[in-house]
Image (cartoon, coloured by chain):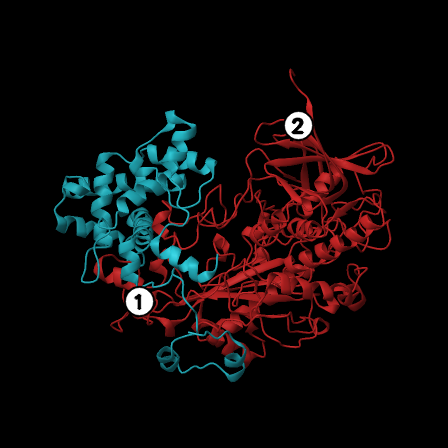
Chain colours: A cyan, B red
């Protein structure tokens, strides 16, 4: 297929998507899982599909833990003028998946959530989610700044660092987050160098050898 | 065991090729186009980047946002199946040494993953013992291979720039892409430090070269497989056209067990186990070409024992598996404060760096032998798993958008803005250097262990020497100089003597070669200068195994050139009925 035709095909979006659901159905009907979670648009080997569907069918966090995670991720990445919040970007769902995919996150997160609830219970007489939002922020302030945190809060700092990492990754890899970040690639284009205004901004330019030898485009 | 039988394929092929990566793909292509009937055995499934699509997918199309898995070690979007460990296919180590073995069982093999870095070896690279007394010279010279490099350039396509460097010969180049912003900074720093930074040399089509393959559309995702075949992978560029000749049959999921030989010791075919039905099969051919990867081909030879070849096929020299060597590697990354808050534009470019540094120094003035080249990356890439990790290590170090220094870490709207502000200001670099091929770095058959197919597995014995450690040390000081000259800050990768200056474990660079090295002396080498086994004239090895030394270059372009050369020789020998 030539490139022009290909770009056209891409534009209407008919290139190579496979439905995992239909594959599963054709070979192992007993493993059929919820359609909503079993459709992949990326290449999957049969081994991968079996693995994905097992992960998607499993559940790690209980209701209370998920509720706590939901409050935490929106404290870390709230809605602002530019874009929605972490929960708008389905970060809690991402975290639920990633701990099943990467079991090394399970204990630090489950234990960290428990640690947080115990701190809140001691201090405010209620688990984190049932605290007033000013109380929630008070405890978060004690663990969100690694260089300022008191030594006895270090376990909380480690937990919050992990929560911050996973929240940021979950958010900025979502559609909302990518738009927010302003990443404008992942589409067919002709790379013709750094835009002139950016070159000017940094006081750099392409030397003559580079201009002479590099690829030029007709249109 | 009831029903155990070996199924014999009645068809007799002219040539059976084991493995469909760079070497096997090239052999299949050359032989099939000469009208020779070829059977291609591949240990993994069929694969076509136009059908098994990963290209132009978004991070959220992977539930793990592109993170690597056991099934795809280079990330959920990477085209290459497999990785360092395969279920039921172990390998072992001797005396606590380390070697990591990357295997990708699929049509096209590891060409589905590689960085498309396509460097010719230079004149010195074939005769390095004559230069520094270490290792061994090749039985061939640059002039022997140059015509094949030319043909590979034209057939497959590579971009780059004419530089007339003495040991980094120019290819027949397509035009390179212009450098990205951070690459301009790297180039300026390099120029100030007398370190050359020139256009990279990648097998990506910046211009179309035929009707079957489209030109690059600059998505930077070569490692995901290209749906328009705008870059080189063996499956799309060699195997597919080879199949179109009608002269090639492919059997996928066929795990080769042994090369079969007759009483005189001549190869008669290959036995394999099918992963589809776990049954045993035999296929017969007049010539057997091994292209299963340096270590896998050595394993096959060593496992092919017979009365005529009691020490393994082609191993009367006892050299099979020895002289295993991988590239050295060390890396460092930095942060460029002047790039914070940068303007957004699409800087994806091609899949990989637009500039690189070829080896530029004279080893006579250094405390180690052999050189390295430097690869660079950075900029405003597509976010994936790991994006934003460790912000507490950045946002407390540099003033934010309002010019004020804040406390590291944090949360909320201010933190959210930090991710935007610091995006695209990181970059990194890695050295890839030449290790010395030594007899005591080897793979051999583990006497105690078999894989799930009952095939005896490889056991590795590999140690870096002082040469490689000192080279890594030099890489590190070079990287630091470049980063500082750019006005950057080193953020990761700085290592000291306690961990060999970041020198990666052997195998990690996936350039392992040398296990069936070529030579004129059959007592000290496995194949002759046409990749033909000294002990068995109808067996050839066309992967990285025959490399005598690996150079500070990526091996693929040389594997392709030598496989083409060996295949043309094979055609002549078949015509003369010498095989």
Which-is-in-front pick, marks 1 and 2? 2
Of the image marks 1 and 2, the number of the one nearer the N terminus: 2
Q: Quadrant of the C terminus of chain B?
A: top right
The image quarter in which residue B326 lies: bottom right
Q: SS for tag 2? A: strand
The picture places residue B352, in percent across and down from the top left corner, at 50, 63
Nearest the camera: B550 or B205? B205
User: In the picture shown, does residue B117 fall above or below B311?
Assistant: below
The picture places residue A71, in percent across and down from the top left corner, at 20, 46
Q: Quadrant of the N terminus of chain B?
A: top right
**Mark 2 belongs to chain:** B
Residue B426 visible in the snapshot: yes
Nearest the camera: B145 or B299? B145
Residue B443 visible in the snapshot: no
Q: Which residue position is annotated with label 1?
A: B421
Q: Which residue position is annotated with label 2?
A: B280
**Mark 1 belongs to chain:** B
Number of marks drawn = 2
The picture places residue B498, in percent across and down from the top left corner, at 57, 56
Horizontal side of residue B499 vs B265, given as left or right: left
The image quarter in which residue B91 lies: top right
User: In the picture shown, does residue A169 fall above or below B15?
Assistant: below
Nearest the camera: B149 or A183? B149
Per the rendering, the mark at residue B31 is none
Q: SS for tag 1? A: helix
Residue drawn at x 59%, y 59% as measured from the top left: B329
């Amino acid at each position: 297929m030539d490139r022009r035709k290909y770009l056209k095909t891409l534009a209407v979006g008919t290139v190579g998507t496979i439905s995992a659901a239909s594959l599963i159905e054709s070979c192992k009907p007993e493993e059929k899982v919820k359609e909503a979670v079993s459709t992949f648009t990326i290449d999957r080997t049969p081994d991968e599909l079996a693995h994905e569907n097992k992960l998607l069918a499993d559940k790690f966090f209980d209701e209370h833990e998920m509720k706590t995670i939901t409050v935490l991720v929106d404290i870390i990445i709230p809605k602002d003028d530019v874009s929605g919040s972490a929960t708008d970007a389905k970060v809690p769902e991402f975290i639920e998946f990633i701990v099943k995919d990467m079991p090394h996150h399970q204990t630090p997160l489950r234990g960290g959530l428990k640690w947080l609830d115990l701190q809140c219970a001691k201090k405010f007489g209620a688990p984190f989610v049932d605290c007033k939002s000013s109380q929630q922020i008070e405890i978060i302030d004690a663990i969100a700044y690694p260089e300022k945190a008191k030594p006895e809060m270090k376990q909380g700092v480690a937990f919050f660092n992990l929560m911050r990492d996973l929240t940021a990754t979950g958010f900025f890899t979502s559609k909302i987050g990518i738009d927010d970040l302003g990443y404008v690639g992942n589409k067919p284009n002709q790379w013709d160098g750094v835009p002139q205004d950016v070159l000017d901004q940094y006081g750099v330019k392409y030397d003559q050898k580079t201009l002479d030898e590099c690829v030029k485009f007709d249109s | 065991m009831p029903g155990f039988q070996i199924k014999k394929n009645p068809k007799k092929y002219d040539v059976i090729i084991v493995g469909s990566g760079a070497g096997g793909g090239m052999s299949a292509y050359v032989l099939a186009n000469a009208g020779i009937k070829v059977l291609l055995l591949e240990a993994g499934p069929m694969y076509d980047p136009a059908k098994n699509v990963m290209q132009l997918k978004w991070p959220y199309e992977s539930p793990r946002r592109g993170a690597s898995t056991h099934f795809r070690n280079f990330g959920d979007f990477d085209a290459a199946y497999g990785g360092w460990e395969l279920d039921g296919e172990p390998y072992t180590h001797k005396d606590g040494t380390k070697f990591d073995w990357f295997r990708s069982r699929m049509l096209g093999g590891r060409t589905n993953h590689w960085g498309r870095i396509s460097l010719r070896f230079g004149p010195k690279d074939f005769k390095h013992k004559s230069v520094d007394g270490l290792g061994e010279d090749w039985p061939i010279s640059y002039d022997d291979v140059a015509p094949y490099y030319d043909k590979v350039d034209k057939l497959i396509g590579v971009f780059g720039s004419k530089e007339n460097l003495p040991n980094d010969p120019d290819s027949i180049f397509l035009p390179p892409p212009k450098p990205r912003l951070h690459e301009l900074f790297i180039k300026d720093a390099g120029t100030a430090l007398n370190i050359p930074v020139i256009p990279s040399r990648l097998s990506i089509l910046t211009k179309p070269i035929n009707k079957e393959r489209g030109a690059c559309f600059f998505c930077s995702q070569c490692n995901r497989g290209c749906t328009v075949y705008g870059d080189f992978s063996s499956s799309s560029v060699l195997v597919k056209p080879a199949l179109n000749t009608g002269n090639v049959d492919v059997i996928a999921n066929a795990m080769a067990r042994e090369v079969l030989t007759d009483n005189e010791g001549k190869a008669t075919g290959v036995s394999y186990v099918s992963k589809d039905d776990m049954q045993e099969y035999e296929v017969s051919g007049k010539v057997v070409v091994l292209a299963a990867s340096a270590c896998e081909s050595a394993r096959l030879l060593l496992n092919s024992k017979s009365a005529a070849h009691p020490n393994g096929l082609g191993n009367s020299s006892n050299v099979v598996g020895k002289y295993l060597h991988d590239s050295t590697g060390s890396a460092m990354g930095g942060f460029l404060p002047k790039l914070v808050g940068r303007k957004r534009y699409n800087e994806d470019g091609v899949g990989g760096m637009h500039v690189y540094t070829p080896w530029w120094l004279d080893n006579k003035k250094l405390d180690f032998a052999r050189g390295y080249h430097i690869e660079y990356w950075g900029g405003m890439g597509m976010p994936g798993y790991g994006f934003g990790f460790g912000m507490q290590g950045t946002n407390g170090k540099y003033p934010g958008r309002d010019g004020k220094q804040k406390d590291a870490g944090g949360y909320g709207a201010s933190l959210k803005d930090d991710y935007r502000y610091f995006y695209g200001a990181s970059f990194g670099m890695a050295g890839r250097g030449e290790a010395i091929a030594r007899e005591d770095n080897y793979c051999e058959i583990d006497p105690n262990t078999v894989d799930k197919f009952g095939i005896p597995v490889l056991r590795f014995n590999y140690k870096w020497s002082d040469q490689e450690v000192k080279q890594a040390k030099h890489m590190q000081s070079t990287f630091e100089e470049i980063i500082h000259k750019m006005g950057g800050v080193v953020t990761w990768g700085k290592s000291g003597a306690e961990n060999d200056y970041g020198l990666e474990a052997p195998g990690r660079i996936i350039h392992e070669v040398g296990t069936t090295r070529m030579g004129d002396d059959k007592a000290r080498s496995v194949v002759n200068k046409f990749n033909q086994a000294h002990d068995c004239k109808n067996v050839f090895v066309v992967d990285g195994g025959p490399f005598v030394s690996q150079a500070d270059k990526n091996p693929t372009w040389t594997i392709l050139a030598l496989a083409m050369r060996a295949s043309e020789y094979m055609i002549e020998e078949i015509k003369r009925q010498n095989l």
